Image (spheres, grey):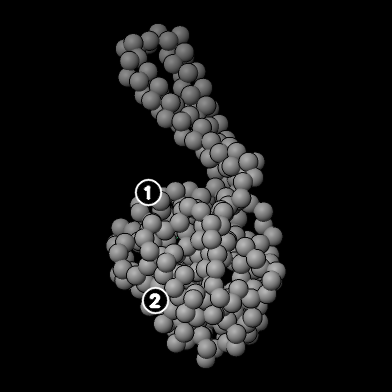
Amino acid sequence: MDLSVVVPCFNEERGLQELRDELNAVLPALVGRFEVVLVDDGSTDGTLDEARRLSSLDPRYRYLSLSRNFGKEAAMLAGIREATGDRVLIMDADLQHPAWLIGDMLRLLDVGYDQVVARRDRHGEPRVRSLLSKLYYVGVNKLADVPLVDGVGDFRVLSRRAVDALLALPETNRFSKGLFAWVGFPTATVPYRNVTRKYDQSCFNFGKLVNYGIDGVVSFNSKPLRAAVYVGGAATLLAFVYAVYVIICALVGHPGVPGYATLIVGITGFGGMQLLLLGVVGEYVGRIYLESKNRPSYFVKESGGSAAPPAQDAA
Ligand code: UDP
Ligand code: MG
């Protein structure tokens, strides 16, 4: 198998046929044998039926259906595990990842890169969102041990050894964007112009994006914990200095107005700071909790496709 295409799908029934048309228009000219693995991530619309239909029409297509919606990370992992190709391409089902870019990406891989990632600009995106994203990436790259690049998503093609490296990482709580960067290997980037979603809304709302952002910071380093120590230390020191100052004032004979304001400022200030620092610690503890349960990232409810190639990749 020359190429496996992994497509996580959550409520994408309307786009799948078109995706197939695009892929079938592009891929045969680029690679010898290819397979497309559609991963239905517990969709509530007809995505599964559509995946079944496409798989029965075309022997190069097969599908997995997860037992519920486990999120895109889990769906990608399921698909990548299932992929048998020497090269694995990951792309979204919503037609935002242009199929015509695949040729360029594969050529770079042939030149000797192990990962080729497509990088989109933020054309047509709400201003606020691109601004927040920009700020986020500036911040996260100050903290993170692996560089995260703005605009780089999960549209990428990996060599077999990069895929195997990725699959060797045991964590269940996955932040792929960081994991891809973490496994290393020579990586090239191909820029492209952002495509806005054709059918309905993004599956990610603002809240999900914020959570994703926190994952990005916390999954890859423990610097926020260190920062918490510094901030906490500095705050305590300041409080101590201030206490000394108040005592000296009192000794010198200027007790001042009984300090209602100071009291309130102190309580809220330090209360807030403590909550914040507790939150940071909690983020890590929560992650340790999740990992320690060691649960699988997903369950497969159903899989199929006429030509599930070699026997070793049974779901
Ligand atoms: N997706 C998924 N599970 C989810 C959410 C999304 O498999 O819980 C898939 C979705 O079907 C799409 C891809 O992940 O193929 C990216 O989702 P979306 O287009 O909503 O994200 P965005 O383009 O806004 O990053
Ligand atoms: Mg999308």
Name the element at disc 1: helix
Q: Is residue 302 above or below residue 19?
A: above
Report the residue at 37% width, 11% height from top.
Answer: 254
Q: Can the viewer see residue 139 in this picture?
A: no
**Residue 17 image label:** 2
Q: Is residue 216 above or below residue 58?
A: above
Report the residue at 44% width, 87% height from top.
Answer: 25
Tell whether 69 sits left or right of 161: left
Front one among 157 and 280 = 157
Crowding at dot 2, Cα within 10 Å, few <14 / some 14-19 / many 20+, comes out as: some
Front one among 307 and 125 = 307
Which quarter of the figure has residue 304?
bottom right
Check if mark 1's residue and mark 2's residue have beta carbons within 8 Å. no
Can you name the residue that lies furthest to the bottom here? 29
Q: Which residue is mark 1?
A: 207
Name the element at disc 2: helix
Q: CA distance from mark 1 to mark 2?
A: 30 Å
From the image, which quarter does the C terminus lie in? bottom right
Tell me the amino acid under the disc marked 1. Gly
Total marks shown come to 2
Tell me the amino acid under the disc marked 2. Gln
